[in-house]
Amino acid sequence: MRTKAVTCALALLLAGSAMAQVDRNAFRERQQQMREQFVQQRNQARRQYADERRKAEEEYAAFRRKANEDYAAAMRQAWEKMTVSPAETRPSEPKPPQPPKAVPDRMPQSIPLPQSEVVLPPSPVAPVPMPPIPEPEPSAPALQLQFYGTACSMHAEPADLRFKLPSIDERTLSETWQKLSLEKYDGILHDCIAQRETLQLSDWGYLRLLGDASQRLLGDGSDEAVLLQMYLMAQSGYRVRIARVGGHLVLLVPFNCNVYNYSFTVIDGIRHYLLTQEKVQSLDVCNVKFPREQVANLLMGNLPDLKGTVRRRTLQAESFGTMKATVEVEQGLIDYLDDYPRFEWEDYARAGLSAGVKKSLYPVLRSQLEGKSARKAATMLLDFVQTAFEYQTDEEQFGYERPLFADESIFYPYNDCEDRSIFYSILVRDLLGLDVMLVHWPGHLATAVHFPEEVEGDYYTVDGQRYTICDPTYIGAGIGETMPMYQDVSAKLVKIGK
């Protein structure tokens, strides 16, 4: 019996082993089938993407050919005399020569503050979408340029792309536009678009890059460079006009907001700014629309990645001495921001800080704020901005009114109330995730923060939510303390958001 039982057990074991082997083989076959199916689906998806991309490029190429033919024909007759309005300068408001100091240990009271209006943040405006330009044939980069301290290489053979304008009359410009429409200029356009993505440039930065590349090819300030830049801008989808003044060519570019320090002419109800500082009263404008053209957006969602000489500065709070960091700012970025058109100060806060500054500053601040309540953390950041910077008005430091981007507040030796409020609003949004507003009184700018917990202090009420005053220029003042001179003055509130 025992022998029979052992024999049965062995038979069952062998049968089970055989079945297991069959199951393993079936599993391997199923795995192989799934791999093959995945490879087929992936290859099919790649072919479909390539087909769609090729189709989009062909459709856009056909669109461009027709658009450029029509544009060149219209250039022969669409010129008209237009007057130029002088550049507007930023209004200057008197500011205190020195920041006032708060009374020590003052207990804030919850006082509602008067307000005149509430300005909502602008609707997000996407940058002009880049067209599907075919990638150039692989070759060694032949065109080298320095864009605000950052090396840029482009697959453009200068000898093949250079041209000369015998005159700037309508016929010559029309014929030259047709030559520019040849495919050999697509390479530099493709590479400029690629550099835009790499450097994270705004519309303005991209237009400057096109200008630098054009001048590198054809000479600084030459009519040929102006015409090439205009051609590249139009092919990129931007609204742009070309004009003659004083025997040379200039560009006219509209933006999504009014800017200071550039003269302009109004075309179709839209301000078009002269990308030159020369003073002119009138010009002959070629007012031809390129299909699908869009107005350039000046707002920056983030600062570009530009290099150069590194400037280091140590920032330290007085009351919270452990909040100390050595911060690095790139000279290339500062030069770029110095050239940036001047627009409304509230939009400077939306640009934020550069990645390099965040890398050197934010870990230090986060380590000090960890575990603190929102009120305590906001108080520590307030003291940091109040005391880590030296105060001086724009007129004293620069000789004219100009807001600073946050990186510029670190680079330049001084800043004033609007610069500190911009800086503080960025820290509160990035590090605390709190909703913040800018508070504008005549001659002064502060901030107000919406806290998740009950906070004592002077406040505004907007959409049923309390925003407590936080003034980075009122030295020694805590959360909820308003400068006495502004407690009864109505303020303009600008919502920045989180």
Image: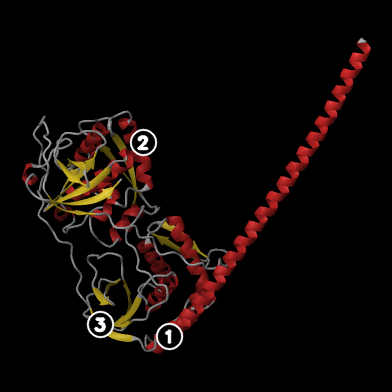
Q: Amino acid at mark 3?
A: Met
Pick whichever of labels 2 and 3 is earlier in the sequence: 3
Say which of marks 2 and 3 sits in front.
3
**Seen in the image, is 88 located left or right of residue 215?**
left
The secondary element bearing badge 2 is classed as helix
Quadrant in the picture for residue 284: bottom left
**Seen in the image, is 475 located left or right of residue 259?**
left
Tag shown at residue 247: none
Above or below, comparing residue 290 to residue 334 in the picture: below
Badge 3: residue crowd in 10 Å (few <14, some 14–19, many ≥20): some
Q: How many marks?
A: 3
The secondary element bearing badge 3 is classed as strand
x, y percent for residue 275: 30, 71
The residue indicated by pointer 3 is: 82
The secondary element bearing badge 1 is classed as helix
Position of the C terminus, as image quadrant, is top left
x, y percent for residue 358: 35, 43
Confirm or deny contact between disc 2 and disc 1 (CB under 8 A): no
Distance from disc 1 to disc 3, alpha carbons, whole Å, reads 21 Å
Tag shown at residue 363: 2
Quadrant in the picture for residue 434: top left
Above or below, comparing residue 377 to residue 52 in the picture: above
Pick whichever of labels 2 and 1 is earlier in the sequence: 1
